[in-house]
Amino acid sequence: MNRIMALAYITFLDGLRRNAVWGLCIFALLCEVCGVFFIDFFGHDLGRAISDFQSSIMWAAGMIFILFYAVQALAWDDAHRNIDSILARPISRTEYVLGSMAGLSLLLLCFEFLLFSLALIEISWIRPHIGEVYFPVFSVSHFIATWLALQVILLTHLSIVVLVSAVIRGAFPVMLITLAYSLICSGLPVVRESLHQQQHADALTHGLDSMLQVMSMVFPDFSKLDWKDSVLSHQSLQSIIGMPAWLPFGLIGIYLSVILFLACIIYQRRDIL
Amino acid sequence: MIRFIDTHKTYPGQINVSPAYHALKGISLALGQGETLGLIGQNGAGKSTSIRLIMGYMRADQGKVIVLGDENSSPATRQHIGYLPEISALPSNLTCMELLRFVGHCSGVQKKQMDERSEMLLERLGIWHERKRRLNTYSKGMQQRASFAAALMHDPELLILDEPMSGLDPIGRSEIIGLIHDLRSQGKSILFCSHLLDDVERITDRVAIIHQGHMLYDGAITDLCADQTEWSIDMQDGEVMAAYDEKELSALLHQHANRIIGVRQARESLQDAFVRVVQGFQA
C-alpha cells in the first residue's frame, strides 16, 4: 500500500506541475464563468440551462484531461522509459497500475472539485439575482450526487485508458480507442431503444437485441448516471432515476475493478520493451 | 548473484515493418558475490536485453535467468538491486530530493536514514546544492548523477549499471569510477555495460564479450589481452626504449645495463582484444 501511495503521490505531483493541466484548468474555469452571461439569453429555463452547462463543462474538461493528459502521461512512461526507473524499485506491476491510476484519479478529482466548487458558487450567486419563476428549485444535494456520478463516469474512462495503455503502445491509438469506447457507450442505448421500438420483431431482431445486451456489459450505459435533471427537482433521487442511487455506483464499481484487474494481468504478462 | 543458463530471447517482429529478432542465442554467464563484471559488445549485441532480463522487464524464451536465487525478479528481489538505466528516465517534474524520497519509500528506508543517505550520496555525487531543482532543469550529466544516487539510495547488494559514464565529463567519469571502486571495496556485486573500454579496464578485471546474441568471451582481461612481442625499457633519465624481438631486447640490456630501471612487456589493449575477438567470430 505504501508503494501505491508513493507512486500515486509522484504521479499527482508531476501532473500538478505540468503547464498543460493548469492551462486546461484555467480554460475550464473561464468557460464556467461564461455561464453568467446565460442570464440574458434564457428565460424560464435558466436554472436548467445553467446547471446543464456547468455539468457539461465539467464532463468535457474531464474528458479532455483523460484523452489528452492521462493518455499522454501513461504513454510517456512507456516511450521515455520512466517505467524502467519505476519498476527498478521493489514495485510490482500491479502496484504500478494501481499507483498510476490512483495518482491520475486524484489529479482528476482535484481538478473536477475546483470546477464543481466554482459551478456551485456561480449558481448560488445567480439564483438570488433572478426571480423565483426563472429558477424555482435548486437541490444542492442532487447537484453533489450529479457531480459524483459524473466522476464515476470519468474514472471508468480513465480505467479504460489504463487498460488500453497496457495493451497498446503510443498515445494516439490509446486516445482513439478510448474515444471509440466512449462513443459506443453513448450510442449503444440509442440503438437498443430504436430496436425496441420496431413493431415487427423477428428472430433477427431478437438475436440482435441479445447481442446488444451482451455488448452493454462491456460498454456500460452511462446515461443511467446522467442525473442532471434531478438538480432542479424537489423529489428524491431514487424516484427520479428509478432505482436506488447506490445501485449504479455499485455496478460501475464492480466494472471498474474488473477493468483494473485485467490491466494488472496484462501488465504482469507483457514484456516491457 | 546472477546466473544466465542457456538463455534465449527473441523480439517479436511487426508485420510489414520488421522481422522477429533473435537477440540472445543461448548465453550463459555467472556473477558471484562481490564480483565486478563488465559486459561489453557492439550496439545491438544483446547487452541491454540481458539487463532487461535481469531486471524482470522481460522473460526469457528459453533457459533461465536467476537473480539472487529468484527466477522471476520479484519486487522482493529488486529490493536488493540498484539499477542505473542507460537513459536517465526520471519523472522530470520532481526535484532530486523528491525522487530520492520516492525511492526510499518504495524500498522501505526509514525517514532519518533516508535523509542521511540522500545527503551523503548527493554530496558525494556533487549535486547536493542542486537538490531542490526540478530534474528537467538538470544537464544530462547531472541527471545521470541523480539517477546514480537513486540506484544507491537503498544500499543494494547488487548493482546493475547500464552505461554509467554516459553524458559525464572527464571529471565526472573519474568521480564515478572512484565511487564504483568504493562500492567494490564494500563487497557489492557489480554488473555494468559500457562502450568506453578504457573505463572498463579501469573499473574491472573481468569482462564478458557479447556479440550478435552470442557470448564470445567471459574471463579475466589479462587472459584476453595477449602479451605482445614488444618490450619497453625504462631508463634512469626517463627515456623509454623499445625492443621488437628477444634478440634486440638482449642487445639493449647489455648495452645499457647500468641505466636500466625496468623492462615491461607490452600488452594488447582491451579495445584491440575486443576487435580481434569479434572479427575472429565473424570470420
Image: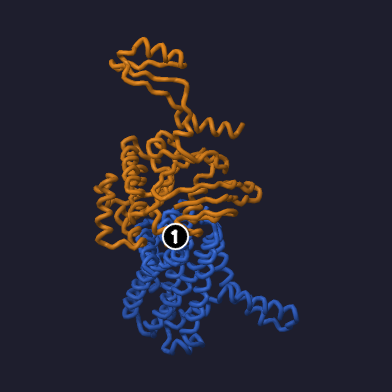
**Mark 1 closeness class: few <14, some 14–19, many ≥20 residues within 10 Å:** many
Q: Position of residue A40 (x, y in %)?
A: 39, 72
Residue at the image position 66 percent from the left and 48 percent from the top: B16
Residue at the image position 53 percent from the left and 30 percent from the top: B276
Q: Which residue lies furthest to the right in this view?
A: A203
Q: In this view, does B175 lie to the left or right of B196?
A: left
Q: Mark 1 points at which residue?
A: A69
Q: Is residue A229 left or right of residue B97?
A: right
Q: Position of residue B172 (x, y in %)?
A: 32, 39
- Rendered position, A46 above or below B19: below
- Comparing B207 with A266, the one in front is B207
Q: Can residue B164 be seen in this view?
A: yes
Tell me what hue chain B is rendered in.
orange
- Please count the marks in the image: 1
Q: Where is residue A164 in the image (x, y as percent from the top left)?
A: 54, 63
Residue at the image position 46 percent from the left and 40 percent from the top: B207
Query: Secondary structure beneath disc 1?
Result: helix
Q: Residue under mark 1: which chain is it in?
A: A
Q: What residue type is labelled 1?
A: Tyr
- Rendered position, A141 above or below B173: below
Q: Position of residue A183 (x, y in %)?
A: 57, 68
Residue at the image position 57 percent from the left and 42 percent from the top: B214
- Comparing B186 with B119, the one in front is B186
Which quarter of the image is occupied by the C terminus of chain B?
top right
- Comparing A119 with B246, the one in front is B246
Q: Can residue B138 be seen in this view?
A: no
- Rendered position, A221 above or below B105: below
Tell me what hue chain A is rendered in.
blue
- Comparing A195 with A261, the one in front is A261
